[in-house]
Amino acid sequence: MRRQVTFFTSLLFISASFGQINYSIDEEMRVGSLVGNIAEDLGIGVERLKSRSARVYFGDSKQYIELNKDRGVLLIKERIDREALCAQSVPCALHFQIILENPIEFYKIIVEIVDINDNAPAFEKGDIKFKISESAVIGSKFDLERAVDLDVGINGLQTYLLLPSDNFALKFHNQADGSRSVEMVLKQALDREKREHLPLVLTAVDGGEPQMSGTMQILVTVLDANDNAPVFTKPEYQATVAENTPKGKVVTVVSASDADHGAYGKITYSIRNTMDDSTRRLFSINESSGEVTLIGNVDYEKARTYQINVRASDDGGLTDSCKVIVDIVDVNDNSPVINVMSKTNVLSEDVKSETVVTIINIHDQDDGENGNVECTINSNIPFLLKSTDSNFYSLVTDGDLDRERTSEYNITVTCSDEGVPSLSSNVTLTLFISDVNDNAPVFERSSYEAYIVENNTPGVSIFTLKASDADWNQNARLSYILEDSSVNGVPVSSYVSVSADSGVIHAVRSFDYEQLKEFHFRVRAQDGGSPPLSSNQNVFFNPG
């Protein structure tokens, strides 16, 4: 396994950080194979990886790699075929994130998929036939079908061999797409009277280890007298097509001429084998007029340019070739995609300003202004949306939260691109504010006066104190407590009692007005918070 690690971090406001780690692995590794020790490379250890609920985030992409939190390593989850994943694109890489909670951190992970030589060069056709006049001059060119090797680099197609090589040699031409076209060049005159049919074998060879190859049979039939080959008016044609262009649109017209007359001067146009077989599904050519027509739906997000290799053939078997380069023009046909990477739906009311609530990833497949996205949230709420990195936003608190004022927020994130007309998407996050014990109990009255007829029955209720608490649940659960004091040297608890739950004042004894005309005491209302908050109230008591 090839492995390369690159790591960097940067502080994201208060509690979110970023970093990047690069790995390199071969394609086709067995499921369960090791990609890298992410716990070691992040420097946080396996236990912290588990305690912070580490996970991998692929967004909408297929998850080829999984995180084993018990070992702190990244493992192959599904077979990775580089050719299926990236075709001919180099380099080929998987992009995903490792997300940690408490505090929120995420790290970009890039895993480069290295090509192995698992594909042999292959020709579209098993054989090809040429009819070549015996009068063909030395140096005459005959365009051959190219082989396609799905591998890249040294594992891709490297060269061709032609056997036997008595009459023909091979000539190569580098193409704009990185491939090489191949021609068969006449190097020794043909003589139909000596040999009418020449069987040849064209072999395409890659540079992998072990080396792989594919073959195509070439049958040359020698004819009489066709001494002029078709010639295109130019070697390359340019065209542009918008990605929303309807089928049937003529892209361009190619033209070739042949100095011969009759059948030998009649030209037939065709599309040759290309590196990308989708070209034939998208474009066709009129074999008589040379009109190149769009027959499929082109998508700028899938391919930005196409190379169409066109052949002109006369009835004598001579050919010429040209290229049609079709550039695809982007239109704004993709709305932004919003991915909420870490969902937090409960936030304590005592959090500090600029605390990170969640991270949002934005992606728009369009290009240029069509792919530039700006995001906003609804106004008049104590939150801000801040751009933290390319295509990433963080939702942070903006000011103090008060559950007693607002206990729930519906935050709508709206993302719009700069296309004309603009396309947008939105997502609504529901955030609940949890209570802290920040409100003391409040009595309903500023003072209380209580009266009772003397010679009362002990235990009779006198009156009720009532307090309220703006907090919630346990923080708002009240208890009433009689404060320690004395009346004429006797504890006040010998005269009255308070029900802890209801606040009802009871007479403990029978009162005699002549002995005790009045007295006062204090009652404390205390909530169930931690630590508890309380308030005191004076009660003036008059037996009579």
Image (cartoon, rainbow, N blue to C red):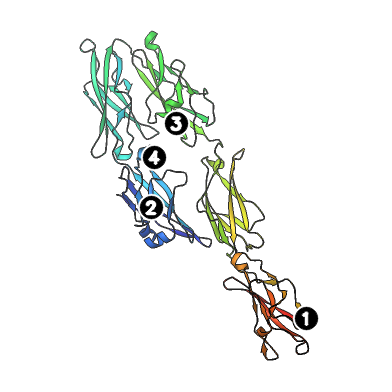
How many neighbours does mark 3 have within 10 angstroms: few (below 14), some (14-19), or many (20 or more)? many
| Residue extending furthest toward the top | 262
Residue appearing at x 53%, y 43% in the figure: 364
| In the image: residue 240, left or right of residue 216 | right
**Residue 489 left/right relative to 339:** right
Residue at x 47%, y 16% (from the top left corner): 289
In the picture, the disc for residue 67 is 2
Residue type beneath disc 3: Tyr
Instruction: Tell me which numbered mark, 4 or 3, is placed earlier along the sequence.
Output: 4
Q: Can you see residue 134?
A: no
In x, y percent, where is residue 393? 54, 53
**Where residue 445 sits: x, y (%)?**
75, 73
Front residue of 337 and 116: 337
Q: CA distance from mark 2 to mark 4?
A: 21 Å
For label 3, the residue is: 306
Q: Between disc 2 and disc 4, whose residue precedes?
A: 2
